[in-house]
């Protein structure tokens, strides 16, 4: 039987460890090491809190590495950076750590080589290559990727999955989520719905 590698696209669990270099996400007792850019690191909750990350799985001959992002937009831009010649996951993460998503998109669309060159670790030639290869690949509706995040049914499913992975019974988790949505609304971020749901287990 041929070996099939299943790539991880999303992880939800408890934040067991975090540092600027990587974090460890405890998903149902399994600890996943995930590398994150500083843009995601600064927005992470406290250790022990639930978190849901969009994942890019990097597969090499000698290693399989996970890169995590709080938003789909961030992950999609990371993947776009990887299409540029001579840019791998580590350099792509470094780019997202040195500039905001909005500033990066604006710099690419406006061909602002100097702005890109100011990112630590990005030389002038690399900045020019980024503009040359990506300026026509950044659609004005790029932010629309986050619409997937806002899908109501999917968000409720993700919240339920997170609580079950944290060890709560499914029926009780469903009740807690329903109360949380009634309190803060379905349009609230997934992480906030999970946090408010957890409040009902301790009340």
Image (cartoon, helix red, strand yellow):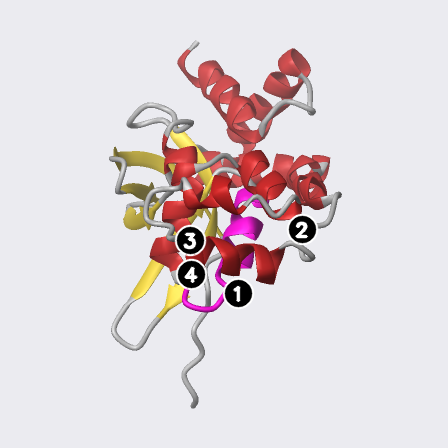
The kind of secondary structure element at disc 4 is strand
Q: Which residue is mark 3?
A: 124
The kind of secondary structure element at disc 1 is loop
Magenta region: which residues?
72-87
Q: Which residue is mark 2?
A: 138
Q: Which residue is mark 1?
A: 83
**Of callouts 1 and 4, which one flags the residue occurring earlier in the amino acid sequence?**
4
The kind of secondary structure element at disc 3 is helix
Q: Nearer the viewer, mark 2 or mark 3?
A: 3
Query: Badge 1: how crowded within 10 Å, few (<14), some, or many (20+)?
Result: few
Q: Which residue is mark 4?
A: 57
**Of callouts 3 and 1, which one flags the residue occurring earlier in the amino acid sequence?**
1
Foreground of the two, 131 or 36: 131
Q: Nearer the viewer, mark 1 or mark 4?
A: 1
Q: CA distance from mark 4 to mark 3?
A: 29 Å
Q: Is residue 3 above or below residue 118?
A: below
- Main SS, magenta region, reads helix
Q: CA distance from mark 2 to mark 3?
A: 20 Å
The kind of secondary structure element at disc 2 is loop
Q: CA distance from mark 3 to mark 1?
A: 18 Å
User: The N terminus is located in which quarter?
Assistant: bottom left
**Of callouts 4 and 3, which one flags the residue occurring earlier in the amino acid sequence?**
4
**Of callouts 2 and 3, which one flags the residue occurring earlier in the amino acid sequence?**
3
Q: Nearer the viewer, mark 3 or mark 1?
A: 3
Foreground of the two, 185 or 58: 58
Query: Badge 3: how crowded within 10 Å, few (<14), some, or many (20+)?
Result: some
**Of callouts 2 and 4, which one flags the residue occurring earlier in the amino acid sequence?**
4
Q: Are marks 2 and 4 in contact (CB under 8 Å)?
A: no
Q: Are marks 4 and 3 in contact (CB under 8 Å)?
A: no
User: The C terminus is located in which quarter?
Assistant: top left
């Amino acid at each position: 039987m041929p070996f099939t590698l299943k790539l991880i696209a999303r992880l939800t669990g408890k934040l067991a460890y975090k540092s600027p270099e990587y974090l460890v996400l405890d998903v149902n007792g399994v600890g996943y090491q995930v590398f994150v850019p500083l843009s995601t690191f600064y927005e992470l909750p406290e250790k022990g809190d639930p978190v849901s990350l969009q994942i890019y799985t990097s597969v090499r001959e000698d290693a399989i590495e996970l890169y995590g992002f709080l938003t789909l937009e961030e992950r999609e831009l990371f993947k776009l950076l990887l299409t540029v010649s001579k840019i791998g996951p580590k350099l792509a993460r470094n780019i997202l750590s040195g500039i905001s998503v909005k500033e990066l998109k604006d710099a690419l669309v406006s061909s602002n080589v100097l702005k890109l060159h100011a990112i630590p670790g990005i030389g002038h030639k690399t900045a020019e290559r980024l503009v040359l290869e990506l300026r026509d690949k950044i659609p004005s509706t790029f932010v629309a990727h986050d619409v997937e995040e806002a899908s109501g049914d999917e968000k409720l499913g993700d919240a339920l999955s997170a609580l079950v992975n944290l060890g709560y019974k499914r029926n009780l988790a469903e009740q807690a989520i329903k109360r949380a949505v009634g309190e803060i609304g379905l349009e609230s971020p997934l992480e906030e719905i999970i946090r408010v749901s957890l409040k009902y287990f301790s009340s």
